[in-house]
Amino acid sequence: MKHTKGEWIVRELDDTFIEVSNPVKGERNGICEILANGCNKRGEEGRANAKLIAAAPDLLLAAMNLLQWKGYTPKHCKENLAAAIKKAIE
């Protein structure tokens, strides 16, 4: 499985929806839309979810880099990283 490459950003479309998109691919190339005010009365949870989704490519790259690090890393940490990476890409 391949994800959309490049930077992912959060844009508030209106009072109801927040979009996670890739600005490199052009206007309105949405990765997903999140119901902003459906999660709680102020939309804070929806915004937090959008930020987490937008950070996913960076987090995946960081996890992959850390897994390849040659320094000491406890076995359970490497196992957790490997499982998270597998969940993200398979």
Image (spheres, rainbow, N blue to C red):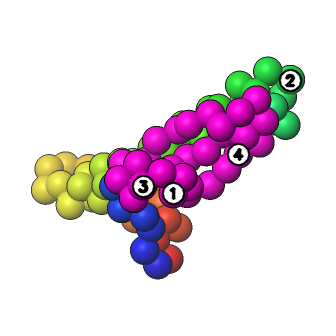
Crowd band around label 3 with a 10 angstrom C-alpha radius: few (<14), some (14–19), many (20+): few
Closest to the camera, between mark 1 and mark 2, is 1
Secondary structure of residue under mark 1: loop
Q: Are marks 1 and 3 in contact (CB under 8 Å)?
A: yes
Q: Earlier in the sequence, mark 3 or mark 4?
A: 3
The three-letter amino acid code for the residue at tag 3 is Gly
Res. 35 image quadrant? top right
Q: Is residue 21 magenta?
A: yes
The label number, if any, that marks residue 41 in the structure image = 2
Q: Earlier in the sequence, mark 1 or mark 2?
A: 1
Name the residue located 24 percent from the left edge and 55 percent from the top edge.
Answer: 65
Residue pointed to by mark 3? 26
Tell me if residue 79 can be seen: no
- Left or right: 86 with respect to 48? left
Residue pointed to by mark 4? 34
Residue 58 drawn at (x, y percent): 36, 48
Residue 40 drawn at (x, y percent): 83, 28
The three-letter amino acid code for the residue at tag 1 is Asn
- Left or right: 59 with respect to 43? left
The label number, if any, that marks residue 55 in the structure image = none
The three-letter amino acid code for the residue at tag 2 is Lys
For the residue pair 71 and 67, the one nearer the viewer reads as 67
Residue pointed to by mark 1? 29
Label 1 – label 2 distance at C-alpha: 28 Å
Residue 15 drawn at (x, y percent): 76, 29
Secondary structure of residue under mark 2: loop
Label 2 – label 4 distance at C-alpha: 14 Å
Residue 76 sits above or below residue 1 on the image:
above
